[in-house]
Amino acid sequence: MTRIGLIDYGMGNLHSVQRAFERLGCSISTVHDSAGMEDCEALVLPGVGAFDPAMERLESSGLATAIQRWCQADRPLLGICLGLQLLFEGSDEGTRPGLGLLAGHVAALPRQIGHPVPHMGWEPLRPMTPSPLLPAGAEPAWMYFVHSYAAVPSDPSCTTAAVAFGDHLLTAAVWQGRLGACQFHPEKSSLSGEAMLRRWLAWVEQPA
């Protein structure tokens, strides 16, 4: 059985994420430090809240360095919501540097009449570069979003899914190497979210 580590730095919706993976028959345990990662085959980095406080907690606990080393060793990690944004170099929401695992920054959503911020609700994904999260030919997927910022990758090819927001297309999910992340909440996205998590788990279980 795949053992997943759920990173706990005090700013994640851990219970709903944990329950989602448990429903898929996955062994998942919370990780508070680098020692807790040792027996894990993959990590999940959730997050709800603001960029700077999240990075401060990751840095003060030593988790930031541990996550960077994990990904530099080409080991699987899935970011969710704020967990996606933290993977980038920085954010308009704060001044602290991010984890820097993906090139690019996180920008505030554009203000448009008829499109309130935060962007909240169910939206269909627009497939971009195929990945294990959203392979070519995957069924149309509606996912649940709650966010006021969105990543702007330096390399557009790492965007595996986008979402429409008024006249703009926002990054909805990214994939690079063995690092994946989604801006939406798959754990709150019913059957579509469950299918995506199931695909990710199946990919994790494949030989590297």
Image (cartoon, rainbow, N blue to C red):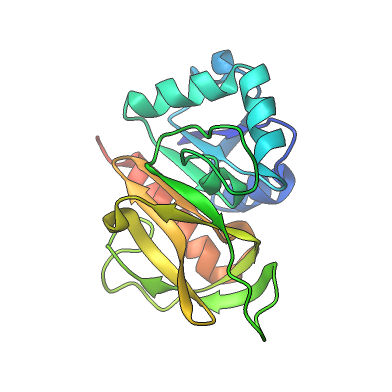
Q: Nearer the viewer, residue 132 or 84?
A: 84
Residue 201 drawn at (x, y percent): 42, 47
Q: Quadrant of residue 68?
A: top left
Residue 182 visible at all: yes
| Residue 112 to residue 20: above or below | below
Residue 181 drawn at (x, y percent): 46, 50
Residue farthest to the top, as pictured? 35
Q: Nearer the viewer, residue 165 or 41?
A: 165
Residue 25 visible at all: no
Residue 148 drawn at (x, y percent): 65, 61
Tally of marks: 0
| Residue 138 to residue 166: above or below | above
Residue farthest to the bottom, as pictured? 114
Q: Residue at x 51, y 70 (%)?
A: 192
Q: Nearer the viewer, residue 188 or 89?
A: 89
Residue 17 drawn at (x, y percent): 64, 48
Position of 2 with respect to 120 (left or right) is left
| Residue 38 to residue 166: above or below | above
Q: Residue at x 69, y 70 (%)?
A: 117
Position of 131 with respect to 64 (left or right) is left
Q: Residue at x 70, y 48 (%)?
A: 48
Query: Which quadrant of the figure contains the C terminus?
Result: top left
Q: Quadrant of residue 33?
A: top right
Q: Residue at x 54, y 55 (%)?
A: 107
Position of 8 with respect to 125 (left or right) is right
